[in-house]
Amino acid sequence: MAALGRTSAELAERLLAGDTRALARAISLVEDDDPEGWALVQKVYPRTGGAAIAGLTGPPGVGKSTLIGALVRSARERDRQVAVLSIDPSSPFTTGALLGDRIRLSEHFLDPGVFIRSMASRGSLGGLSEATLQAALLMDGSGKDEVLLETVGVGQADVDIIDHADTVVLALQPGSGDSIQALKAGVMEIPDIIVVNKADHPLADTMVREIRGILSLGRQTGWRIPIVRTEAAENRGIDELVEKIEAHRAHIEAEGTLAERRRRNLENEVMTLAALRLRRRLEESTRDDPAMRELLNEVVARRVDPATAAARLLEREV
Ligand SMILES: Nc1nc2c(ncn2[C@@H]2O[C@H](COP(=O)(O)OP(=O)(O)OP(=O)(O)O)[C@@H](O)[C@H]2O)c(=O)[nH]1
Ligand SMILES: [Mg+2]
């Protein structure tokens, strides 16, 4: 880990004081996998944990960015400082979604109380999903009251940034049976709040009923998952969504589950990062290793099964 040079120590100070340009610069450093970026996060980390982190997830095009735009507007009306981190799961070379965000969130770009950043989740070295977590921490450390995360679907990145959220909102749109199936099959984690956006659609009521049906089958907890109808593009239903997000936060704070949840999420992050590094190390140490090639030959020739080979590999490495 690089020591914090004089310029980055100064950068950290400015970031902690809420300087937006310092935050942007710091995020670029972690995005470029610059060791100074990691050193910055180290320095900033003790000052994180103050922001309320909400994650919005859901299939492409349901209106996540539009919803976030509306949530930002609402937060600004209450004089809250906000940061938005949009994760684009497509290749880092496409700009479609990023361009869309730019339009959807354009009214907030000149507001110094709002910080918006889009990042790709998939990099050539698989490191970018780690960078998204670092970026979220930097936003938190820069003193924002709220951090809003936008991701498409679930389980697409190594480090699932949505797991970093205190409150997870799943956005769906009427007529998309796939999402309902995924929810039913348990492929999709049960969120804290469900939004049915584009609620002007004739199938909106049907969808709400279907979701209710699925939720009634699940385990009952102290928190009843609300289903909120919104028309994000028209700013309808946003007050109710804000109310539910705040109610959820109040609920987890009162029950002590916020601390529990953060502990679990952080444990997950540590394990995931460690596993990723272990894998990278294994790949590097075996790349040009004749013994490894020999072992694989044995697997290919059906003399050693894959599990035994894996055990031998680990024995050798640790
Ligand atoms: N009819 C209708 N259209 C909406 C509503 N909310 C958003 N849209 C439109 O839906 C389209 C997609 O909205 P986005 O906010 O970009 O959706 P997204 O989920 O962020 O999309 P990706 O980030 O590309 O996955 C845009 O053309 C929006 O204007 C709504 O309530 N009703
Ligand atoms: Mg979007």
Image: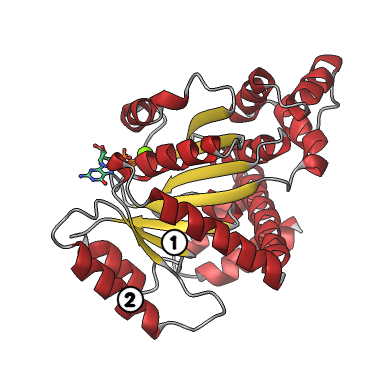
Q: Is residue 135 visible?
A: yes
Image x and y of residue 83, in percent? 57, 35
Measuring from the top left, give residue 47's x and y in whole percent.
80, 41
**Which residue lies at the image location 79% right of the left edge and 20% below the top edge?**
8
In the rendered structure, which amino acid carries the disc numbered 1? Val
Residue found at x 62% / y 68%: 251
- Disc 2 secondary structure class: helix
Mark number for residue 212?
2
- Secondary structure beneath disc 1? helix
Q: State the mark number for residue 193.
A: none
The answer to whether residue 83 is above or below residue 215 is: above
Of the pair 155 and 188, the residue shown nearer to us: 188
Residue 155 appears in the figure:
no
Q: Which colour scheme is used?
A: secondary structure
| Label 1 Cα crowd, 10 Å radius (few <14 / some 14-19 / many 20+) | few
Quarter of the figure with the N terminus: top right
Residue 242 placed where, x, y %? 48, 52
Q: Residue at 54% x, 80% y: name it.
A: 221
Of residue 179 and residue 268, the one placed in the foreground of this image is 179
Quadrant containing the C terminus in the rendered view: bottom right
Mark closest to the chain's N terminus, 1 or 2: 2
Distance between mark 1 and mark 2 Cα atoms: 50 Å
Say which residue appears at 69% left-offset and 53% top-offset.
274
Q: Which amino acid does label 2 sit on?
A: Arg
**Disc on res. 300:** 1
